[in-house]
Amino acid sequence: MKQALLPLVLGALLLGASQSTAQLIKLELINGSFTNPVDLVFDHENKLYVVQRRAIVRVLEPDGTLSPDVFFDIDDRVQSGSERGLLGLVFHPEYPDSNYLYVNYTNNSGNTVISRFTVDVEGREADPDSEKVLLTQDQPFGNHNAGDLNFGPDGMLYFGLGDGGSAGDPVNAGQRGDTYLGKMIRIDVDQGDPYTIPDDNPFLDDPEILDEIWALDLRNPWRFSFDRATGDMWIADVGQNELEEVNRQLADSNGGENYGWRCYEASSEYNTDGCGPISSYTFPVWEYEHGSNGGCSVTGGFVYRGSKIPELVGKYIYADYCSGRIWALSEDGGVWSNEELLDTDNEISTFGENQDGELFLADLDGRIYSIEPTQATRVEDELHFKELSLAPNPAHDRVLLQMQVEQHGNYQFRLLNLDGRILRSWDEQVTGTYSKSLSLKDLPKGVYILRIQRDKREHSLRIVRM
């Protein structure tokens, strides 16, 4: 049996920890004529480049019209289908002055290729004969190719690779340092031939880990992005059979994070044979279950920095490919909240962010949508406090809950494990400040959720027992 050990709050349908809102967003169809779109990229003029898995890129003008010309076509060297194909594209940060684009694709042998191509001076097409291969990686199986690539605020090129495929990481790629599989890679494409390794990459002095590696032990990071306001990196990593996860790497990180796969699937033990202590790993800020949730494969998005939907500014927008649900994830004082924005019938394969910070998404069936506001009024179902804390946290034997409420009344307290089972419950009439020392002596080491309720409003906190 898997044992959940790590510090995070599980998804709303498991613990009831989400906010409930009136519908804030709607999807407006822009164009439905594509074949398996897997990446949406905007240039400096807000032209939208639709990356299709079969290795053909078409352009939507800012007014939504489809350009009659094919912008890019490398179908002759790409093996597409299932999780293979042309999987990601990004322009150089100085584009069009630096007229390069970079792609991630699986070649005719089924292996990953990271390459640079040149765009003509008019910006009408990328020359398929201008390819400069930067890096290749053999793929032992046909799935878990990941495929996204982005330039960070530091000007370095980042890209993620999955663990090589099959199930359960049979080659243990995630925990090995001698392969790019299951890793986040960081290189400098403005220096060297074909690139140089940044001198502040975290593993330069470790002979057992490849120098290009920035972070370790991902299963299949299907879409990652940088918050344009803070520089934080958000990585959506597809799970095995039970859990999907979202990771946040802060902008001041020096790299070197170990995200845990295959030792852990999100916060739960998966295969800990040969794994290090729990302190060795960086765990997701959010995860959600499969099962009744309908989820099966997380699709990473962006932190919203647009102006159309003020209620979403600063929140991470992401989705699930199988259920079609779109969520907004946010943090307030170390407490994470996840709110469902829309339940769709779409197979959401990717998101895109234009120059104005507005968001778009693609359905694998070929439809491109913009995310637009509704006129609905927000209904806030989460409790608010003047003060709220748990200390120490992590804790050994005891943790002190302290709170000062905005609204007096009867409050219900429930301590749950990560399976949602209530371990303790009590009610209190709170008229201002309230404190309670909670004994943890009888609980195994791990993560627990303290849920506080009043009327139909609620708030959840995590407790970590070490």
Image (cartoon, rainbow, N blue to C red):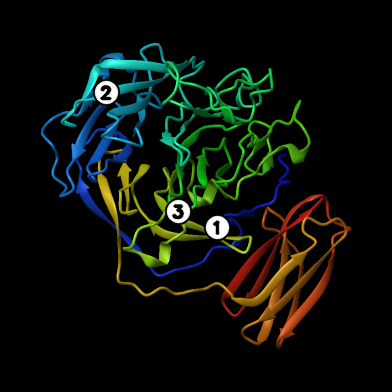
Locate residue 375, reporting x and y percent.
30, 71
The alpha-carbon separation of the residues under discs 2 and 1 comes to 47 Å
N-terminal-most mark, 2 or 3: 2
Locate residue 333, reporting x and y percent.
62, 64
Please tell me the numbered disc located at residue 229: 3
Report the residue at 44% width, 74% height from top.
379
N-terminal-most mark, 1 or 3: 1
What residue sits right under mark 2 in the picture? 118
What residue sits right under mark 1 in the picture? 13
Report the residue at 66% width, 26% height from top.
175
438 vs 464: above or below: below
The alpha-carbon separation of the residues under discs 2 and 3 comes to 29 Å
Report the residue at 56% width, 76% height from top.
456
Question: 257 or 368: which is nearer to us?
Answer: 257
At label 2, counting other C-alpha atoms closer than 10 Å, the crowd grade (few under 14, some 14-19, many 20 or more) is many
Which amino acid type is shown beneath numbered disc 2? Thr
